[in-house]
Image (spheres, helix red, strand yellow):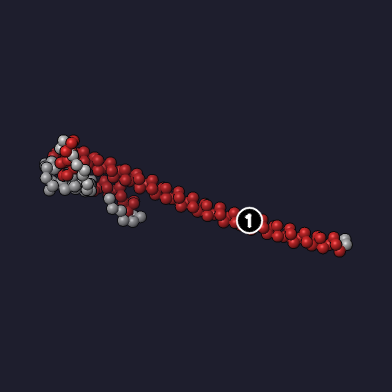
Amino acid sequence: MNDSQLREFENRQGSILIFALGILFCMILYSVAYLNYMMMQKRLSERAGKQGIMSRIAFALATLAVHKMQFGPLLAENSGAPFPEKNEDSPSFFELYRELSSPHKDMKKVGGIVNLEEVPTSDLFSITKDLLAPIEKMGHLNF
């Protein structure tokens, strides 16, 4: 091998080294981006799972409220308590029952909170306690 061939071979070794380092750098960048993508997917799936659980619990609480509105006065009358005819009989349902017993054209929008633990119209505390116990471990829950 003469000097010119040797110099050409040494120049190629440098360009091969730069090419290999460039490929290694691209692989590292791709690995970091893939790791970030996988972490994002994990967080999204955890959030979706929590939202699914919360939506099921919200649906269960809404179902309990509907059952209490439907059957609460009947249970109250069967146990000797009065049908909610005044605010003291059922503070959380009196306005709703008053509006539902009026003619359709006279009905107004009713606001407020349905108290599932109201004793005169069937106390549902035991059911709500069992339903909310696993969620209250994650933090305070107000319904």
**Residue 62 percent coordinates (x, y):** 28, 43
Q: Is residue 139 left or right of residue 8?
A: left
**Residue 16 percent coordinates (x, y):** 73, 58
Q: Quadrant of residue 101?
A: top left
Q: Nearer the viewer, residue 11 or 107?
A: 107
Vertical relation: 86 (above or below) 19: above
Q: Nearer the viewer, residue 67 or 95?
A: 95
Vertical relation: 142 (above or below) 73: below
Residue type, numbered disc 1: Cys
Mark 1 burial class by Cα count in 10 Å: few <14, some 14-19, many 20+: few
Can you see residue 45?
yes
Q: Is residue 141 left or right of residue 68?
A: right
**Residue 45 percent coordinates (x, y):** 45, 48
- The quadrant in which the N terminus is found is bottom right
Can you see residue 72?
no
Q: Considering the numbered disc 1 on the image, is that residue within a helix, a strand or a loop?
A: helix
Q: Quadrant of residue 63?
A: top left
Q: Is residue 126 left or right of residue 28?
A: left
Vertical relation: 26 (above or below) 81: below
Q: Nearer the viewer, residue 125 or 69?
A: 69
- For the view shown, which residue lies furthest in the right direction? 2
Q: Residue at x 52, y 52 (%)?
A: 37
Q: Residue at x 35, y 47 (%)?
A: 54
- Name the residue that disc number 1 marks: 26
Q: Is residue 8 left or right of residue 52?
A: right
